[in-house]
Image (cartoon, rainbow, N blue to C red):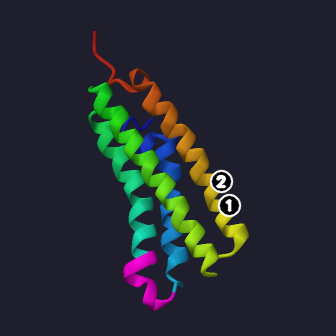
Amino acid sequence: MDYSFRGLNVFQKSYDLAMEIFHLTKSFPKEERYALTDQIRRASRSICANIAEGYRKRGYPRYFSNKMTDADAECSETMVWLDFSCDCEYISESKREKLKQGYMEVGKMLGGMARNPEKFLPKTNS
């Protein structure tokens, strides 16, 4: 069993979603390279990075909660970029809704982690 952040369902799900966004944005127009494409990729990847960073310091519950809250904020930002992507007609409405459902699930998991950091404390050898 993987006891690192990589073993967390929330990490795995957010990583898969970020990779889906990466592949999806390959088809975005070149003029969006340094705007929408860059922003949505960064926000989606930042979710994973914040989970990893917070999990590594889970012995400090307030820090852990803060990083899970940061990850949740990046999750919300990603959903805004999905709205722009759809409204600019770069992705379909159904693709936006599928991805947003995934990010809403990730957000719920992150909220639970932020509210209950004690569940993620490192195991101590007694």
Q: How far apart are marks 1 and 2 (CA)?
A: 5 Å
Instruction: Tell me the crowding category of disc 2: few under 14, some 14 to 19, or many 20 or more residues within 10 angstroms, Cα based.
Output: few
- Provide the major secondary structure of the magenta segment: helix
Amino acid type of the residue tagged 2 in the rendering: Gln
Please tell me which residue is depicted at 39% across the width and 21% down the height of the picture: 118
Q: Where is residue 102 in the image (x, y as percent from the top left)?
A: 61, 53
1 and 2 marks in contact (CB < 8 Å): yes
Amino acid type of the residue tagged 1 in the rendering: Lys
Q: Mark 2 points at which residue?
A: 101
Label 1: element kind:
helix
Determine whether 62 is above or below 43 in the image.
above
Splitting the image into 4 quarters, where does residue 31 fall? bottom left
Please tell me which residue is depicted at 27% across the width and 26% down the height of the picture: 59
Q: Mark 1 points at which residue?
A: 98
Please tell me which residue is depicted at 50% across the width and 89% down the height of the picture: 29
- Span of residues in magenta: 29-36
User: In the rendered image, which quarter contains the C terminus?
Assistant: top left
